Image (cartoon, rainbow, N blue to C red):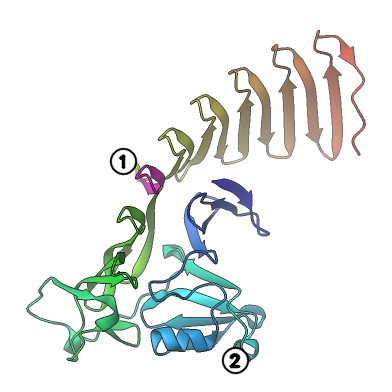
Amino acid sequence: MEGHFDQAGHRTIRLSKIDLTVVLSFNNLVMSLEPGPGLRTPEGTGVGSTLGQLLQAHGSYEMTSGYEDVCSVRVPQHPGVFFQYHSCEKACAGEGAYSVWIPGEHSWDESEMAPEALRSKNLQKLQMNQNELRFKQGVALMPKEEMAFSGTAIATDKNDKKVSEANYLHGQLHGDVTYFYPSGQKRLLFSYEKGKFKSGMQSWYPNGQKDLDSDFTKERCRRITKYYQDGQKEEEGIACYEQQTSKRWYKDGQLKSKEVRKEGEVIRKRWFKSGELKSKKVIQDDKETYKRWYKNGKLKKKEIREGGKVKRKCWSKKGKKKACPKKK
């Protein structure tokens, strides 16, 4: 797993074993999922797919032009997935999708549900092949009748191995959508409610060990937890209304860093692998105080920024005051 920030300052998590990037809001909520070229739909489409390939794989598509002429394309089987092109003109000229975008629950408007006339009054839990379903205006229909599908749709690969399993209610995704490794082991799990992606997700390594988990605590705070392959916790972020906390650990379980954000204050600490405090930064309104230590516990540097002014002091490993190196 790699952690970075996008151009807007949102934190991103790149999963190590799955070609997927998770984009987080400033409150650690899942804003969107961005599959890379290596992660495809059960029909084989994804980053790089042309309109012709989408048409061949999905039967139809819808195009809309948005901000800065970006062209977003949806296919009936996956109404919550957007294939993005630099412009609709370039898409029609054969350009491949430069990205695939799955927005989180806070990016969605109300989903279009199946009309009342298409809803079955005698609801049954059916199981069907994903490719047998028909889609009309984003609603999954039964193969040979004008009735919205409710049940489980399973997609398989050319070797008849299960690729994904999706639950529907009245033609809309409702419940878990699960993707599998060729071995049959779970790979990804998303949660939907009446067609809306609920920002809850889980992923697993090929060995069955949990990779990423997104859920709520009993206090209704959003929690995102990332694990190493051996099961040791690697990172955890908890976002509550009043406070956001994130922690990271070394592979041996030693705490690596901790950050706490609340109104008007940010406290960020880092530790050496041996457990000694490495640095501490405190931001209070327009004042920023930064301290850094040597491994032997001696203070190495102290820096205070306030009102456009910077005060800086430095010490040697033996604790003697010295001149601070000039910043380039």
| Residue where numbered disc 1 is placed | 218
Q: Is residue 122 left or right of residue 127?
A: left
Secondary structure mostly seen in magenta is strand
Q: Amino acid at mark 2?
A: Cys
Q: Position of residue 49 (x, y in %)?
A: 54, 79
Residues 231 and 220: in front is 231
Q: Is residue 284 left or right of residue 162?
A: right
Q: Position of residue 38 (x, y in %)?
A: 51, 64
Q: Position of residue 80 (x, y in %)?
A: 41, 73
Where disc 1 sits, the SS reads: loop
Count of labels shown? Answer: 2
Residue at figure coordinates x 40%, y 84% from the top left: 58
Q: Is residue 135 left or right of residue 316?
A: left
Residue at figure coordinates x 20%, y 79% from the top left: 149
Residues 112 and 80: in front is 80
Q: Amino acid at mark 1?
A: Lys
Residue at figure coordinates x 78%, y 19% from the top left: 300
**Residue 207 is one of the magenta-drawn residues:** yes
Q: Is residue 99 left or right of residue 230?
A: right
Q: Position of residue 5 (x, y in %)?
A: 64, 52
| Residue where numbered disc 2 is placed | 92
Where disc 2 sits, the SS reads: helix
| Region in magenta | 206-216
**Residue 82 is one of the magenta-drawn residues:** no
How busy is the neighbourhood of tag 2: few (under 14 within 10 Å), some, or many (20 plus)? few
Residues 175 and 83: in front is 83
Residue 105 falls in image quadrant: bottom left
Q: Quadrant of the C terminus?
A: top right
Going by the picture, which residue comes out furthest to the left?
A: 122
Residue 70 falls in image quadrant: bottom right
**Can residue 61 be seen here?**
no
